[in-house]
Image: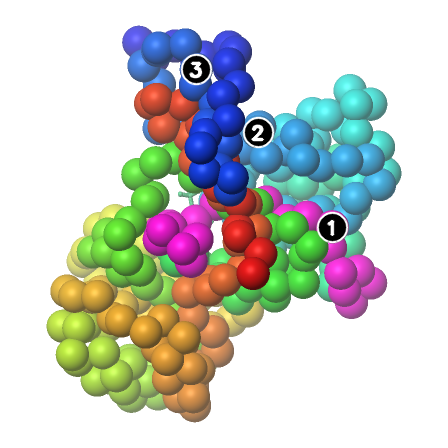
């Protein structure tokens, strides 16, 4: 049975942008690793902050922890900005005071998971379907802390072979999906409409998955590296019918990775 680890010995690595925390040698489940990364991130939250609340199984631990610290009186006057209806419901159930971008257009910090992280801290997000709200919220925070277990680390964006989601309007979705696939023909791209069944891991068709914004999601699968990410982003966003894509380029300020050998904290190098 997996045992959660209880303490860290702090060691600063030779690289100035990276801090390593080595735990006791124990076996951890993926969910425990997610929770460790989440709790570490919540240490960066201070009373009085406006906090972006991410979506997904990793971010859920961070929201739980913020709720717990508020309940214990260790955090005070937090305002949460949820990135999905699901997180909104979770935060409400924990008694976290909530607001939105209309009232709080600048956030102190946001904490969220990711589906992929490349060596330059570029991300793929949105396999949970909340990419648009996540990008809106996380694009206006002073610190964007990404929390993952080490399975999310990739050599290049798309490198996991799993989906890079694109939120599109439902109108003529096949047309938009085809244009997206053609855009990345050079990388062996296959574009698939996400369905409720496929979002649960069962590839047998079903009704289209509908986002919190009433849109569809087309998942792009790449066989090869798509190359210039900024060019890819611009090309996707130029297509009428596309609402947003799941590449979060140059947005993360800190990435916390929990792995079997400890927690690694990578900070963006400010040029
Ligand atoms: O982008 C997201 C949801 O839209 C999630 O942050 C991402 O899918 C990671 O999820 P998890 O923590 O469950 O692995």
* Residue 160: in magenta span: no
Mark 2 nearby-residue class (10 Å; few <14, some 14–19, many ≥20): some
Decide whether the magenta segment is chiefly helix, strand or loop: loop
Say above or below: 162 vs 177: above
Callout 1 secondary element:
strand
Eye-nearest disc, 3 or 1? 3
Q: Where is residue 244 drawn, in percent x and y?
A: 47, 74
Q: Where is residue 68 drawn, in percent x and y?
A: 69, 25
Q: Earlier in the sequence, mark 2 or mark 1?
A: 2
Quadrant location, the C terminus = bottom right
Label 3 vs label 2: CA separation? 13 Å
Q: Nearer the viewer, residue 171 or 63?
A: 63
Residue 93 at least partly seen: no
Highlighted range, magenta: 102-122
Q: Where is residue 49 drawn, in percent x and y?
A: 79, 44
Residue 214 at least partly seen: yes
Q: Which residue is mark 1?
A: 108
Residue at 32 percent of width and 85 percent of height: 176
Mark 1 nearby-residue class (10 Å; few <14, some 14–19, many ≥20): some
Q: Which residue is mark 2?
A: 40
Q: Is mark 2 within 8 Å of ligand 1?
A: no
> Left or right of 26: which side holds 7?
right
Q: Which residue is mark 3?
A: 23
């Amino acid at each position: 049975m997996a045992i959660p680890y209880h303490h860290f010995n702090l060691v600063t690595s030779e690289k100035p942008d990276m801090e390593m925390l080595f735990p006791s040698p124990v076996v951890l489940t993926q969910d425990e690793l997610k929770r460790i990364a989440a709790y570490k991130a919540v240490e960066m939250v201070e009373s009085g902050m406006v906090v972006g609340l991410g979506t997904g199984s990793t971010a859920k631990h961070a929201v739980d922890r913020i709720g717990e610290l508020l309940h214990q009186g260790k955090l005070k006057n937090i305002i949460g900005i949820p990135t999905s209806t699901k997180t909104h419901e979770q935060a409400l159930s924990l008694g976290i005071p909530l607001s939105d971008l209309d009232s709080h257009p600048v956030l102190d910090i946001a904490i969220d998971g990711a589906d992929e992280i490349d060596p330059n801290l570029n991300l793929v997000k949105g396999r949970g379907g909340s990419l648009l709200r996540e990008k809106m919220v996380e694009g206006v925070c002073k610190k964007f802390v990404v929390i993952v277990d080490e399975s999310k680390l990739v050599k290049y964006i798309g490198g996991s072979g799993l989906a890079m989601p694109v939120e599109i309007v439902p109108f003529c979705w096949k047309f938009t999906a085809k244009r997206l696939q053609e855009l990345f023909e050079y990388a062996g791209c296959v574009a698939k409409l996400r369905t409720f069944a496929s979002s649960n891991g069962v590839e047998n068709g079903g009704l289209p998955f509908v986002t919190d914004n009433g849109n569809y999601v087309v998942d792009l699968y790449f066989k090869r590296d798509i190359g210039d990410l900024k060019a890819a982003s611009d090309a996707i966003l130029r297509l009428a019918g596309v609402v947003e894509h799941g590449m979060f380029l140059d947005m993360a300020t800190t990435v916390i990775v929990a792995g079997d050998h400890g927690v690694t904290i990578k900070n963006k190098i400010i040029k």
